[in-house]
Image (spheres, rainbow, N blue to C red):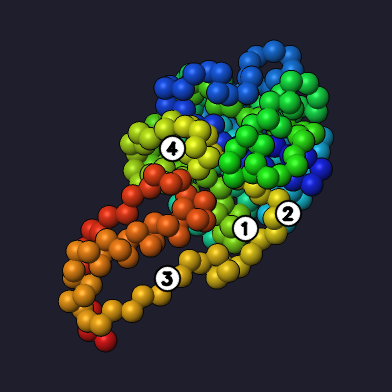
Amino acid sequence: MKLSSVFQRFLILFLSLLALEPAIFYSYDSTAESTINAPSDDGSSPRVDLTTPFLFFGNKYQQIYVNNNGFLTFNQSSSKFIPDSFPGFKNQDIIAGLWTDLDNSAKGQIYYRQYTSGSILQRATQDIISFSNFSNLNFNASWVFTASWNNVAYYDKTSTAGYDTVNSSNYFVIPGSNSGSSITKLNTSSNINVPGRWAFRVDGESKPIAEKTLGLQLKLNSYLNLMNTTNVEFILEKVRQNLIKNGLPDNIQMKLRKLQKINP
């Protein structure tokens, strides 16, 4: 889901594993105002012309495609049913609510709609300013685009949720969404302390990955110091704090799987 004002663009993902109340979503239905994708395995919407240009990390788009397999593209539709792992370092911008192998010809509906007036704009405005990440912004939504994959059947594939940009100059993967076919915490995870919701500001310019790389400098007198459990826990906590500072939820946990000494 993408929200915008004249100067600010936001991406909101509402994620559900049938555990969220329907009220958490913006309205979606089969009314004349909403458009429904035709039933088709690995299909897509036709080109959707946007009433308001959408700025996504420096690229301004006048159109969008709602792909049946759970993701949005801008330059062309996509039938890919095996998701890329982000960063994909590909040549297109992608917003993936839940990119996996879906088939709406078997079950479910895919809706999309644009709003330029009405209660949805008011709700979008209230949502953005209520999120702690954006509470200091003067935001007023003037346009909303929603895409909903409602009860669509899917195959047991590895999935990806988040977004990726051209050459992966900006990307984000919701923790756990690309670790296998069993994703059990999407409806409880969040980066804005609202279970099942993720929000990102996406109207900034793309930056080289080097400028986004996190660095942590530590000085240890010996390998034995690193083997000390207390020191390891200290290092992991510092890494965790840096990740939270850069947008991950504050309930993430860091665990050491293996410690190996490598001689220079």
- Residue sitting at 39 percent across and 56 percent down? 240
Report helix, strand or loop for mark 3: loop
Q: Where residue 49 appears, x then y in whole percent? A: 78, 36
Q: Which mark is residue 166?
A: 1
- Label disc, if present, on residue 189 of the rendered structure: 4
Q: Which residue is mark 3?
A: 216
Q: Mark 1 near mark 3, Cβ–Cβ under 8 Å?
A: no
- Asked if 218 appears above or below 190 in the picture, the reply is below
Of callouts 1 and 3, the N-terminal one: 1
Would residue 85 appear left or right of 76 to someone viewing this image? left
- Crowd tier of the residue under label 3, counting other residues whose Cα lies within 10 Å: few below 14, some 14–19, many 20 or above: few
Q: Nearer the viewer, mark 3 or mark 2?
A: 3
For marks 3 and 2, give the CA distance.
32 Å
Percent position (x, y) of residue 74? Answer: 68, 45
For marks 3 and 4 on the same chain, the one whose residue lies earlier in the sequence: 4
State whether residue 151 is above or below residue 167: above
Tell me the mark number nearer the camera, choosing from 3 and 4: 3
Q: Which mark is residue 59?
A: 2
Label 1, residues with CA under 10 Å away: few <14, some 14-19, many ≥20: some
Of tags 4 and 2, the one toward the viewer is: 4
Residue type beneath disc 2:
Asn
Nearer-the-camera pick, 4 or 54: 4
- The answer to whether one can see residue 189 in this image is yes
Residue 156's label in the rendered image is none
Q: Amino acid at mark 4?
A: Ser
Total marks placed: 4
